[in-house]
Image (tube, rainbow, N blue to C red):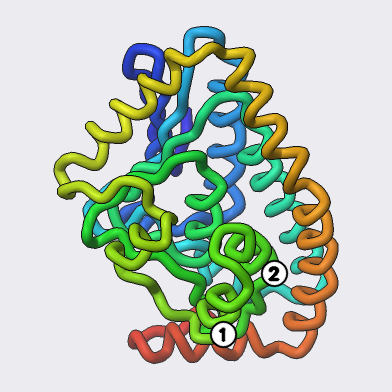
Amino acid sequence: MTKFIKLAVDGNVAIITLNRPEKLNAWNTEMRNEIIAALKQYDQDAAVGAIIMTGAGERAFCAGQDLEEAHGFDEHRADEWMTEWENYYRTLRSLKKPLIMALNGTAAGSAFQVALLGDIRVGHAGSRMGQPEINSGIPSVTGPWIMKQMLGLSRTIELTLTGRLMEAEETHRLGLLHHLVAPAEVMSKALEIARALAAKPPVAMRLDKQRFYEMTEPGFVDAIAAGRRIQSEAYATGEPARMMEAFFEKRGRSITG
């Protein structure tokens, strides 16, 4: 039984639904661990040919890291945090089966990164994407690594330093969203793609995905190492905690009291 995600299988397609709509599906450590376990389970299941990830509700695929969890981190917890992200991202990167992201709404911060680690992305006009960590005092490391591969350095710098969210039309034009459909058609389109990919020769599929993993592994290792160093330095200054506290106070409540 899972607490923060819903699991389903439709024929030979497994569906993982992020299920914290009251938090815009923002994830904490426990939720990510549930996702990792589900991904590994389905990747080993011979009856499953493809996997879809989506979010509950109509507003967000995922708002990224739950700031209430990250607020109290210090430099030591930040290092452990990077190990957790390394495990999550490596699980996504090492899947043998195709992963389709059905973006039912906004994908921000680490959720933007996770969406980009999927193989094919489907969204609608409300599927905004971006890397707003700087606004919470959190430096971006893995995000720029992923974005640079897909967008080049110039656009990566602009998105990282401004923290702006891109509208769906822009992400589609840039090739981040492969399919832009009506909101009611996101899951049906994702299922169509998943079934088509599940029907491909499985050995060729596994080896193609393995090669993409090999091509990007050196950069991933470097990004994780840099993340440990940079996140520890940032949290040691207390800036992320101050910025997150200001974020919550602006919305009328404190997370320290």
Residue at 60% from the left image edge and 37% from the top image edge: 36
Q: Which amino acid does label 2 sit on?
A: Val
Q: Residues within 10 Å of mark 1 (few under 14, many from 20)?
A: some
Camera sees residue 51: yes
Answer with left or right where residue 135 lies relative to residue 24: right
| Label 1: element kind | helix
Residue 117 on image: x %, y %: 56, 47
Answer with left or right where residue 128 lies relative to residue 87: left
Residue 118 on image: x %, y %: 51, 43
Q: Nearer the viewer, residue 121 or 63?
A: 121
Q: In which quarter of the image is residue 83?
A: bottom right
Q: What residue type is labelled 1?
A: Leu
Q: Nearer the viewer, residue 110 or 220?
A: 220
Residue 202 on image: x %, y %: 57, 13
Residue behind mark 1: 161
Residue at 52% from the left image edge and 70% from the top image edge: 68
Residue at 65% from the left image edge and 45% from the top image edge: 88
Residue at 43% from the left image edge and 22% from the top image edge: 197
Camera sees residue 136: no
Q: Which of 111 and 250 is in front in this view?
A: 111
Instruction: Determine whether 119 is above or below 170 in the image.
Output: above
Q: How crowded is mark 2: few (under 14 residues within 10 Å), some or many (20 or more)?
A: some
Q: How many labels does the image show?
A: 2
Residue behind mark 2: 141
Instruction: Determine whether 193 is above or below 63 in the image.
Output: above
